[in-house]
Amino acid sequence: MTELVKSSGNPLMDSIRSFARSFGLPRLIIAGFLLLLFIMAPFVGANFFTQLSNTLNRFSWNAILVLSMVPMIHSGCGLNFGLPLGIIAGLLGGTIAIELGITGAASFWMAILLATPFAVVFGIVYGFLLNKIKGGEMMIATYVGFSIVSFMCIMWLLLPYSSPNMIWGYAGKGLRTTISLEGYYIGALANFLQINIGHLSVPTGSLIFFAVMAFFMWAFLHTKTGTAMTAVGSNAEFARSAGINIDRTRMLSVVMSTWLGAVGILVYEQGFGFIQLYMAPFNMALPAVSAILIGGATVNKASITNVIIGTFLFQGIVTMTPTVMNSMIHMDMSEVIRVIASNGMIIYALTRKSEVTR
Amino acid sequence: MKNRKTGYVPTKEPVTFASKALEFAKNNTVPLMFILICAVCIPLSGFSINYLLSEIVTRISRNSFLILSLLIPIMAGMGLNFGMTLGAMAGEIGLILVSDWQIWGIPGMILAMIISVPISVGLGIMCGKIMNMAKGREMITGYIMNYFVNGIYQLIVLYAMGAIIPIIHSSIILPRGYGIRNTVSLLSMRQSLDNLIAIRISGIKIPVMTFVVIALLCLFIVWFRKTKLGQDMRAVGQDMEVARAAGINVEKTRIISIVISTVLAGFGMIIYLQNMGNLSTYTAHSQIGMFCIAALLVGGASVDRATIGNVFLGVTLFHLMFIVAPSAGTTLMGDSMIGEYFRVFVSYAVITFALVMYETKKRRASSLAGRALAEAQKASGEAEK
């Protein structure tokens, strides 16, 4: 195939080159790699539709977590390495909903409702902090996330939860590390209008929920406030002279990101089937960050398309590499490849020239 | 609000003891906080003073070298070198190879150090170059570099070793024929540096030779600060543009500072692991950067200023907290896990706090500078009238 491209003259070559430049070489490599995996899947005995459903499922779990990156990138707060903060709000919502004894799909909506005040309060405090340290957001966000996760580890042990489905059986107190959602909001979205044809199963409900969220985000970014947010992110000086209150706009974006993080983890849990507490939220920011970057976002630019492409590519690689790799070379190198590719992507994005708002 | 801002007059307060004490407390919040935590936790933990002292001596000898490796990038204005883990991985590769070749004791350590140097230098150059591309975001870049290089490390250690790089010893290699086991025993190397010259004072073992090595590194750092290169680094750390105008090769200087730090971190890791006596192949390095940085910050260092004194104060206070927290937690809450989580939380909180302090100080300094410039312009304008 490369031979064909080379022999077909300069204009095509140039257009490919400019496409590669605008799309980014690492992104092209990752997309090509995934394509290769999909092509090879049938040859190594993996069913194409099973693989596709796996990818779609994982896409539906993670898409909103990735979407939660968008507001903060738009307002110039950089990549939201502080995602665990939103996740904690979501976990609080989820566990309290179960504690209140709400069952079935209703517990999912209740969890979102209960998580909202936490997300808003966390977001306001976090946004206030980030406004104090403009320019150093990403590093501090990382450590704010780590601090809250380790702080909540203590809290999960101490908070007066009493639902027997959640606490340690023998100690009679303290939440378990993994809580099954059987009977609660497992598949609350995914089972809604689920399509099953042969090996293909599509979690329609989750996808619709994501589509609605993404549409609202898109619509918001086109409102006056949303445009102001983009203006703050792309040129703070210009935004200030246009009379936009920078601190308040940034604060709003942080609250939005945190709330989306909270909803995102609940959507993740309803697909995954378990609530994971303690150190589990610790490393959840990095996959979401690298997913949106793989989708074509930069440190201060992101769109809904980036979210969709990025999540699909990232989750595609996560689900496909183990199956294909294992059956090809009988070696599970998928984890290592994922680590190198996703973190390489973040480093690539960090080294791109972009304005740092100070 | 506006009036107060424009009418800003730097008032000179009379220097009293109280104001001095307040100033001191403000500048040393983190160490003071830690002294307080330790003061509360030590009686609760119920450990004897002798036990605590011997633990602290061990931990100072184990960790100081690693923490000292952080100083030079701070001098060059590159912040806390989260990429020191790269050096630690290089050191581990050295140790794995040496233990496969069955070279033990001090010769083994020295050989491991020699092997780690080219790897560290290579990784350091790569890290430095990437950080030069991400100026102003060195720390987060270094932090992600950890994960990235950790992936490459796993690729080499888990797949290439035994398959491409010959590893023969069955105690090291996985039964499947390639890849290194989860733990590599360094039993025959265990504390060989510590025990070279060790004296006991009332039951507390003092590894003199390790302290000599640490002292040599301190002397090196003191000497290095005075060399031309050290001066250049400080100039780069102060202001990159001014340094460039003065004819300093800023990019190269920054790369060198990271390379030195990475190489030292590699040596530090080897000293750390000879004390521990076994190597957790895939996890030993994962937290080391975080603990070293937290310890340095606990000692009163900040992102742009750190001294050798900070290192030793920090390692003492931080590890004291680390030793006493779990049992203090058990006494206080009846659950040792609370103490465990508490010490992890404190480590992260300290780093967060120090980073926030640094960023706010930087912003305040730049706004003060702007204000001073405006005042000066106004004054010169009035003088012209």
Image (tube, rainbow, N blue to C red):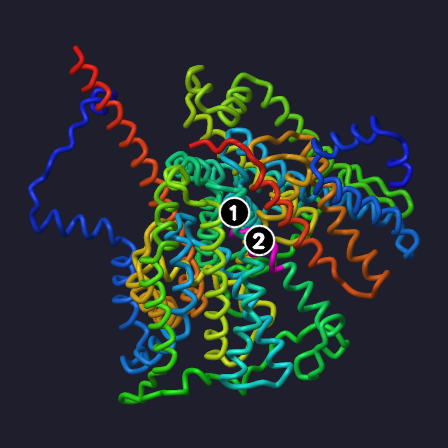
Q: How many residues crowd around disc 2 within 10 Å: few (fewer than 14), some, or many (20 or more)?
A: some
Residue B58 in the image: above or below residue B244: below
x then y, percent, for residue A185: 66, 46
Q: Main secondary structure of the magenta part?
A: helix
| B222 with respect to B110 (left or right) | left
x then y, percent, for residue B296: 36, 60
* Image quadrant occupied by the N terminus of chain A: top right
Q: In this orientation, does residue B329 appear?
A: no
Q: Residue A215 falls in which quadrant of the image?
A: top right
| A337 with respect to B93 (left or right) | right
Residue A321 in the image: above or below residue B198: above
Q: Which residue is mark 1?
A: B131
Numbered circle sitting on residue A283: none
Camera-side residue of A245 and A19: A19
Residue A72 in the image: above or below residue B63: above
Q: Earlier in the sequence, mark 1 or mark 2?
A: 2
Camera-side residue of B55 and A174: B55
Q: Which residues are magenta?
A: B140-150
Camera-side residue of A54 and A69: A69
Residue B60 in the image: above or below residue A224: below
Q: How many residues crowd around disc 1 within 10 Å: few (fewer than 14), some, or many (20 or more)?
A: many
Q: CA distance from mark 1 to mark 2?
A: 9 Å
x then y, percent, for residue A92: 51, 47
Q: Which residue is mark 2?
A: B126
Callout 2: chain:
B
x then y, percent, for residue A150: 46, 56
Q: Are marks 1 and 2 in contact (CB under 8 Å)?
A: no
Labels 1 and 2 in the same subunit: yes
